[in-house]
């Protein structure tokens, strides 16, 4: 997916509009196959060739010559990869991070049960931390977060809308510390600002 830009030529704009129209038609059920209504016809130019490494194939298609553009933030924020599941997101992020030099810092979550939600004693025995760490929630990050200095990340929730830290804001990691992450904002209303993202207590909705 390419993010819209005023610098696109007319051919690129037409191609983008055709893709948008196709996506809308798929959602409206207008792109069903003639053979089976539950199947969708996809143009050949939208299909990647079969590969032994599907994740790497996607990365190469969206970010060609990634190694030569690692330092260019405009290149990294001009494109995005959308996936149907968080597991695929983790695989793609891990694959892309290999292209960044430097030490990989691993941050771990600390899950626990709200004691007031249960009347049962010994909740820690029923729900040990090791078990909680394996759970995945739609509105909570994964237990393991791997980051490298220079990598680009995106906020997945509103942290401070008044300060411009909204869901979807992109940042380039500039510092990785034990209790916080520093990033340079690459999108939104405060581009260029340095912000600190601390550890935060969260709960699933």
Image: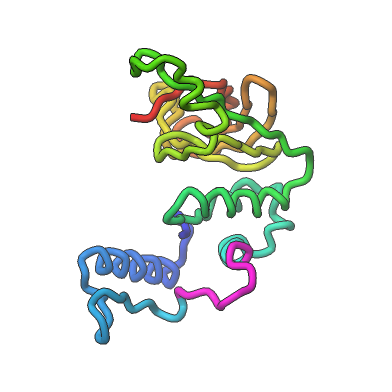
Give 52 or 17, whichever is nearer the viewer.
52
Which SS type dominates the magenta stretch? loop
| Magenta-tinted stretch | 46-56
Q: How does the figure colour the protein chain or chains?
A: rainbow
Residue 60 position by quadrant: bottom right
- Residue 89 visible? The answer is yes
Q: Is residue 47 magenta?
A: yes
Please tell me which residue is depicted at 73% across the width and 57% down the height of the picture.
Answer: 67
Q: Position of residue 167 (x, y in %)?
A: 42, 35
Please tell me which residue is depicted at 58% across the width and 67% down the height of the picture.
Answer: 54
Report whether 122 appears left or right of 41. right
Q: Residue furthest right?
A: 102
Residue 33 position by quadrant: bottom left
Q: Is residue 187 magenta?
A: no
- Residue 5 visible? The answer is no
Give 25 or 121, whichever is nearer the viewer.
121
Residue 19 position by quadrant: bottom left
């Amino acid at each position: 997916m390419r993010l819209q830009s005023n610098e696109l030529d007319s051919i690129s704009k037409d191609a983008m509009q055709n893709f948008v129209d196709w996506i809308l038609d798929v959602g409206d059920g207008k792109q069903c196959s003639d053979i089976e209504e539950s199947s969708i016809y996809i143009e050949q130019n939208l299909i990647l060739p079969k590969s032994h490494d599907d994740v790497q194939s996607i990365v190469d298609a969206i970010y060609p010559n990634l190694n030569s553009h690692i330092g260019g933030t405009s290149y990294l924020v001009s494109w995005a990869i959308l996936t149907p599941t968080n597991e695929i997101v983790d695989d793609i992020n891990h694959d892309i991070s290999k292209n960044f030099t430097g030490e990989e810092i691993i941050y771990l979550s600390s899950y626990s049960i709200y004691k007031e939600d249960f009347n049962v004693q010994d909740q820690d025995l029923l729900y040990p931390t090791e078990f909680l760490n394996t759970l995945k929630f739609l509105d909570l990050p994964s237990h393991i977060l791997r980051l490298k200095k220079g990598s680009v990340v995106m906020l997945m929730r509103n942290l401070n809308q008044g300060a411009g830290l909204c869901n979807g804001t992109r940042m380039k990691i500039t510092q990785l510390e034990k209790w916080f992450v520093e990033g340079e904002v690459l999108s939104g209303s405060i581009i260029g600002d340095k912000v600190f993202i601390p550890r935060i207590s969260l709960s699933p909705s």
